[in-house]
Image: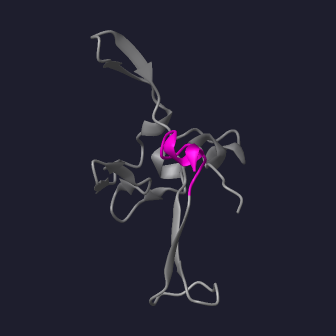
Amino acid sequence: MQKKIIKIKEIFSKQKEIKPICGKCRLFDSKENICRVLILHEGEKINLPVAKNDSCFFENEFLALNEEGHKESFKPEVQQVKFWVEDKKGKKTKGDGTVKIEYPEGFFGNRDKES
């Protein structure tokens, strides 16, 4: 099974003249005014509220303090994870079956490399 990481830059790369602005992004939900990139934080699912003219949150660089109290800069990383259910014959279904997950290598840290 091939794993693919979709980065925000790839969304805009097909038309290089497009700036990373929410209203021009395929991940912008204009009805709800949210970014459809789902953030998982401590088991909670979060969608960022955004406006049409906002620049992409995920293209920004941020400063934070590490455990030693030193400043570190970071840029949020967007990775694609897929979930689906398959029946006993291996076909996708909306009913009961086996839950499958596809995620990038290293998504769960080092523990997914050890198995």
Residue range in magenta is 103-115
Q: In the image, is residue 70 above or below residue 64?
A: above
Residue at image position (63%, 45%) is: 12
Residue at image position (66%, 55%) is: 3
In-image side of 27 versus 52 (left or right): right
Image quadrant in which you'd find residue 54: top left
Q: Specify whether residue 36 is painted magenta.
A: no
In-image side of 64 versus 114 (left or right): left
Task: Examine the rendering and report whether any part of residue 31 can be seen.
Answer: yes
- Residue 88 in the image: state x and y as whole percent: 58, 89
Residue at image position (39%, 15%) is: 72
Name the one closer to the observer, 79 or 47.
79
- Residue 50 in the image: state x and y as whole percent: 35, 48
Quadrant where the N terminus sits is bottom right
Image quadrant in which you'd find residue 92: bottom right
In-image side of 4 versus 45 (left or right): right
- Residue 17 in the image: state x and y as whole percent: 68, 39
In-image side of 19 versus 96 (left or right): right
Q: In the image, is residue 5 above or below residue 65?
A: below
Magenta-drawn stretch, dominant element (helix, strand or loop): loop
Pick out the residue farthest to the front: 115
- Residue 60 in the image: state x and y as whole percent: 45, 29
Task: Examine the rendering and report whether any part of residue 55 can be seen.
Answer: no
